[in-house]
């Protein structure tokens, strides 16, 4: 049993270093399978989702060697089988990337339906549509997805909806397919571009990532490489909200400011002052928080992963804000937790109306998912009094050293564990 204990009411002040992007890492790690060689992956975030990906690779026969806290050498030359262990694949949503990687290399793959945060149905129909277009047949039996093809051939694929997962899986499957694959209506997030760049560093020919159309010319063989993952825009955005909601002043380092533009734009309208530098941003606030209208959309729109965080910020704005969730139907499960803190939020379907209040009150809280958990941490930092947040495993799936980083900014936060003998241990 672990929880965070937070004494709020202090502004965050200082510097924080942003880790590698979770959403890129959990796709790039399975992609090493395509190399059938040694890859060195740098700037990996030290989070449980990365650990789960490494466990899957190891269980399948990959040789994994830790070079330092953020770098791994992964040798996928000799794997034994194309089926991902059921218990491991159910632990995280991104396990479905092993479908595309294994299909691309071996022409077959079996993976459990994705797990991770419960944000609503996670259909994989667009993934299977891409695999089918390349010549694969699929079957779903007892929660296991099986795809196989005797021969993958490039084809045109138009996605019915913009899907990050389907875009990445299609790239993984297509890089060694015969001929040209054209993917249309694709996702354009920064980690899509990062995965494409990694594939190209391994010898693939992927062009157009970051635009509406990606063209992939199949190659016969891939090879190992050394690659450094981009910084995490959502982790950066989380600390940007932390600085703004507490009225602090934080220099957020190791970022790509252009990736943060959709977040920066909204926070400035809400009253934050943001200075951009080459690889860092400074966020501060001295005036009131202003209300906003926000709708989450695929990149370059406002990211759905930031929705709970901006909602928490707007609970303290002077006026009425409207949040429309355009991606996931279960994104508002944190609202009941904020209500414990005195927030005034009404939800109807995918729309939340937030009436700003003067202050948030400390309360016992429970993290319903990864990003909502991070949002509750920021709310607790802004509230007077002591808040306790349970189910912090959700948060630690995507935030490296969050306690240590917040302590470095002056926050009074501790991770409390209750060992089997019921003695309390504070880290």
Image (cartoon, helix red, strand yellow):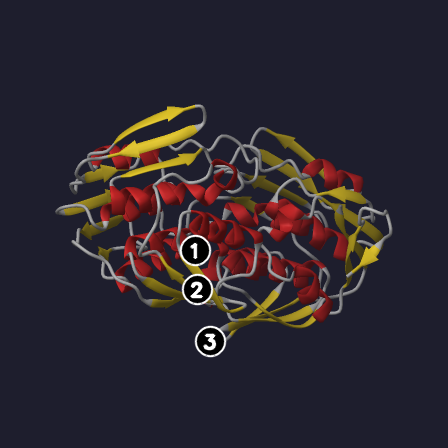
Disc on the earlier residue, 3 or 2: 2
Disc on the earlier residue, 1 or 3: 1
- Residue lying at 27% horizontally and 36% vertically, measured from the top left: 131
Residue 24: give its label. Answer: 1
Nearest the viewer among 41 and 106 is 106
Are the residues flagged by discs 2 and 1 in contact, CB closer than 8 Å? yes
Distance between the alpha carbons at the discs numbered 1 and 3: 21 Å
Q: Is residue 81 left or right of residue 118?
A: left
> Which image quadrant: the C terminus?
bottom right
> Which image quadrant: the N terminus?
top right
Are the residues flagged by discs 1 and 3 in contact, CB closer than 8 Å? no
- Residue lying at 61% horizontally and 62% vertically, measured from the top left: 240
Q: Position of residue 68 (x, y in %)?
A: 52, 70
The residue tagged 2 is 230
Nearest the viewer among 81 and 100 is 81
SS under mark 2 = loop
Q: Position of residue 32 (x, y in %)?
A: 35, 56
Q: Position of residue 385 (x, y in %)?
A: 86, 54
Nearest the viewer among 251 and 67 is 67
Disc on the earlier residue, 2 or 1: 1
Residue 278: give its label. Answer: 3
Q: Give the answer, above or below, for where 10 lies relative to 187.
A: below
């Amino acid at each position: 049993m672990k929880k965070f204990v937070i004494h709020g009411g202090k502004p965050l002040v200082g510097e924080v270093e942003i880790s590698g992007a979770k959403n890129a890492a959990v796709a790039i790690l399975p992609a090493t399978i395509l190399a059938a060689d040694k890859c060195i992956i740098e700037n990996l975030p030290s989070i449980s989702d990365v650990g789960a990906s490494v466990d899957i690779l190891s269980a399948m026969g990959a040789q994994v060697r830790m070079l330092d806290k953020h770098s791994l050498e992964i040798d996928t030359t000799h794997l034994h089988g194309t089926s991902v262990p059921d218990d491991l694949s159910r632990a995280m949503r991104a396990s479905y990337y092993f479908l595309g990687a294994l299909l691309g290399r071996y022409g077959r793959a079996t993976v459990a339906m994705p797990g991770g945060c419960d944000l609503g149905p996670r259909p994989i129909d667009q993934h299977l549509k891409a695999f089918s277009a390349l010549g694969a047949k699929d079957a779903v039996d007892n929660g296991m997805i099986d795809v196989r093809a005797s021969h993958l051939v490039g084809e045109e694929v138009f996605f019915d909806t913009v899907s990050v997962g389907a875009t990445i899986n299609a790239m993984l499957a297509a890089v060694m397919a015969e001929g040209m694959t054209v993917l249309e209506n694709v996702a354009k997030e920064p980690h899509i571009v990062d995965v494409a760049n990694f594939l190209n560093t391994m010898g693939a020919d992927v062009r157009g990532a970051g635009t509406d159309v990606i063209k992939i010319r199949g190659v016969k063989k891939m090879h190992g490489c050394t690659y450094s993952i981009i910084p995490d825009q959502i982790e950066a955005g989380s600390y940007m909200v932390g600085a703004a909601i507490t009225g602090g002043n934080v220099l957020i380092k190791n970022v790509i400011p252009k990736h943060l533009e959709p977040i920066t734009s909204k926070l400035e309208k809400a009253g934050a002052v943001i200075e951009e530098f080459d690889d860092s941003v400074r966020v501060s606030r001295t005036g009131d928080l202003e209300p906003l209208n926000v709708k989450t959309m695929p990149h370059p729109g406002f990211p759905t992963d930031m929705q709970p965080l901006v909602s928490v910020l707007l609970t303290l704005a002077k006026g009425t804000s409207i949040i429309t969730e355009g991606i996931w139907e279960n994104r508002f499960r944190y609202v009941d937790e904020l209500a414990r803190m005195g927030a005034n939020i009404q939800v109807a379907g995918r729309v939340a109306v937030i009436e700003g209040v003067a202050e948030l009150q400390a309360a016992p809280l429970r993290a319903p998912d990864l990003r909502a958990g991070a949002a509750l941490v920021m709310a607790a930092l802004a509230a007077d009094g002591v808040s306790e947040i349970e189910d912090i495993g959700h948060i630690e799936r995507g935030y490296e050293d969050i306690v240590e980083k917040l302590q470095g900014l002056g926050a009074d936060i501790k991770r409390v564990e209750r060992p089997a003998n019921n003695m309390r241990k504070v880290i």
